[in-house]
Amino acid sequence: MAEFDEVRLDAEFSAYRTALFPAIAPDGPASVRQTVRRRRRRRAVAVAAALVVAVAVPVAGQAGLRRNPGPPATPTTTSPTPSDSPSPTPSVSLSPAAPDGRIERAELLAATVDLPSWDDLPDRPDGKQCHSRGIRLSGDPVGDDVNLLVELGYGDVDRDGATETVVLVRCLFGTRGPAQVVAFDRDAAGRIVTLGRVAATADPTPEWLIGLEVRAADGVTRVAMADRAPGVGWPLEQSQRQWRGYKWDGQRFRQVEGPQGFGPNPYAADVSVSSSNLALTREPGDSFAGTIQVRVRNASAGEVPIAVLSFGLPWQLRPFGEGWDRCRENMLEARAPYHCTLGRLAPHADIRFNLQLRRAQGTPLPSGKATIELLVTGADGNGLVERDRDDNFATITHYYG
């Protein structure tokens, strides 16, 4: 039975192969190439899809980080991977940005600052000085010991890429108001620090600082100044004015622009007069006479067009002798008070001359004092103004020798 079944199965398989094999044709070369192209297209599509997924995931992650930044990232240090032909990578060193030294007026007035010492200025006022350490600037001109904030300017004066603050400060103690221009900055902690003094008043000039400006192009601080300080009888319009420029050299501010000094001011003078005492001795008859030596000086570099000596003498004393010939007036015919017009005083002139005085007969005169005043005027007849007029007066003690 089993053998019969096997024979029957073999017969069936033989009949199936005989009928089927003629209908099966093997693939030729064209069919093979078409199959390879289909497989390559499927592989390219799969790779492209993978790339889209790889790019989309980081972008989506970054978008999520922007919406919720979270804590700052901790920087990591990686070691370079060695290669057969390494290319050197330049290292970049980034210095920290300079602190912003722009200080607004209200903040500066509320702060405690240090100024360069007023004692360093050659024209510092007599007596008590304005304080310079740990002080508060004032916005109002009140008090006797006040550092008045006159003006502010801003600019990169030390060329560090950040702004600094430059101020004009005037010391109100004293009559001429000594002043200085000072630059302030901030340190890394934001505290106000003093960079240095830009310019200051001096003796003999400049007596007055008018204003300031900081030039943005090169950081030069320009200071407007005057040779004479305004005051009673002296308007600022009669002062000579000029601009001078100062630049930071890393250690201090140095003048880089403008004049080094002022010429003679046509409205100003610096003259003085002095005299010896008068010893009256008896002459033949009942008269007494004596001689004084008078010295007139022009200490300025400018000419004084007209100089006049005014004598405040007792009426009993009269001029005589050749010494009075220097006067334009005929002093022998003049009456008290006597005025001796000397005329022009050259720059730095120093004149000395002897003048004789006599007490007339029969006119008693006790010992006492007399005065001489030196008056100076310009070519237009207007009086010249002097910073110190105390030396324009001389005192004569007259007595009997």
Image (tube, helix red, strand yellow):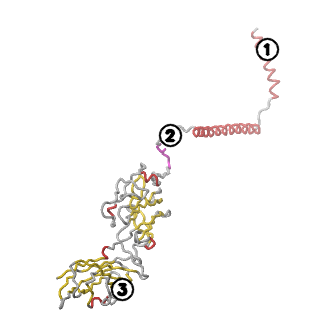
Q: Are marks 3 and 2 in contact (CB under 8 Å)?
A: no
Kind of residue indicated by mark 1 = Arg
Q: Is residue 353 left or right of residue 11?
A: left
Furthest residue in direction top, as rendered:
1
Disc 3 residue crowd, few under 14, some 14–19, many 20+, Cα 10 Å: some
Q: Nearer the viewer, residue 127 or 64?
A: 127
Q: Residue 196, image x and y in percent?
A: 38, 60
Is residue 81 shown in magenta?
yes
Q: Are marks 1 and 3 in contact (CB under 8 Å)?
A: no
Q: Which residue is mark 3?
A: 343
Q: Which residue is mark 1?
A: 8
Residue at image position (37%, 77%) is 269
Q: Residue 312, image x and y in percent?
A: 30, 80
Q: Nearer the viewer, residue 41 or 316?
A: 316
Q: Nearer the viewer, residue 387 or 227?
A: 387
Q: Which residues are magenta?
A: 78-85
Kind of residue indicated by mark 3 = Gly
Is residue 203 shown in magenta?
no
Regarding residue 147, the answer to whether it shows in the image is yes
How far apart marks 1 and 3 lie (CA) works out to 165 Å
How far apart marks 1 and 2 lie (CA) works out to 82 Å
Q: Quadrant of the N terminus?
A: top right
* Mark closest to the chain's N terminus, 1 or 2: 1
